[in-house]
Image: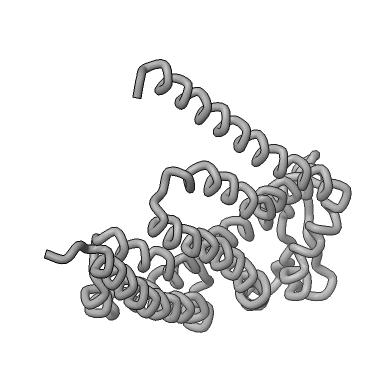
Amino acid sequence: MEPEQSGQSLISHLLELRTRLLRSVAAVVVLMVALLPFANRLYALLAQPLMRSLPEGASMIATGVAAPFMVPFKFACMLAVYLAMPYVLYQVWAFVAPGLYRRERALALPLLVSSVVLFYLGMAFAYFLVFPLIFHFFATTAPAGVLVMTDVASYLDFVLALFLAFGVAFEVPVVVVLLVLLGFVDVPALRQARPYVIVGAFIIGMLLTPPDMFSQTLLAVPICLLYEIGLRTAAVVARRVASSEEAAAPDC
C-alpha cells in the first residue's frame, strides 16, 4: 500500500472511531435526559430493599446539604450508562468487526452478547435476592438502642459497588471460555482446578456479603454453577474450533 493510501485509510478509521464515540456519548446523554425527571422515583425504587428491612419508624437520611438532589441525580446518570452499555458495545463491535476473520467474528459476537446478558443478570440477582437478605441481616443485628437510619449517599455507593461485584462475578462463564480459546489453559486443567475455584468462590462470598454463612453461600453457589456452565461451554466451543481447523487444513 502506498503511503498516501495508508494515510487516507488511517484518517478514515479515525473518523469512524470519532463517529462511533459520539454516538455512544449521545446515547448516554439521551438516556440521562430521559431519566432525570424520574430520578427521585428511580432512587425510591432502588431503596425499596432497604426500606422494607428497616424497623418501624426508621427512615433514610441525607447528611449532605445537596444530597437530596445530587444522590438521585448521580443514580440516574449511572443508570443511563448501564442502560446504554449494549449500544456502546455494539458501536465498539461495529468498529472492530471488519478487521476480524469470519471465524473470529463468529466467536466474538456470542461472547459479547453473553457478557452483557450475564452482567445484567448479576445485577438483577443482587437486587431481587441478595439485597433483601443483606439489609435484613444488617437491620436485625443492630445493638439495642441504636436506630438504623442509613445515609442516602452511603447507600447508593454501597449498592453500586455490589451491583458491579455481582455483575463481574456473573462473567465467570465468559472468562472460562476466553481462557480456553486463547490457549492459556485447557478444559481438563480447569476441571482439575475445580476445588480451588470452590474455595475461592466462598472467599469472594465472604468478602462481598455480610459475615453469615447463608449470604456467603448465596454468592458462592452461583459462581460455582457459572464455572461449571463455563467449563461445558468451553468444551463444546473448543471441539467446534478444532473441527473447523481440521476441515480447513489442506491435505498433505
Q: Nearer the viewer, residue 211 or 171?
A: 171
- Residue 87 falls left or right of residue 152: left
Residue depicted at x 78% and y 55%: 61
**Going by the picture, which residue comes out furthest to the top?**
4
Q: Nearer the viewer, residue 238 or 56?
A: 238
Residue depicted at x 54% and y 62%: 113
- Residue 143 falls left or right of residue 229: right
**Going by the picture, which residue comes out furthest to the front?**
251
Quarter the C terminus occupies: bottom left
Q: Nearer the viewer, residue 172 or 174?
A: 174
Residue 58 placement (x, y as % from top left): 80, 67
Q: Can you tell which quarter of the image residue 53 is in? A: bottom right
- Residue 25 falls left or right of residue 198: right
Q: Is residue 2 above or below residue 71?
A: above
Residue 88 placement (x, y as % from top left): 61, 47
Q: Is residue 230 above or below residue 17?
A: below
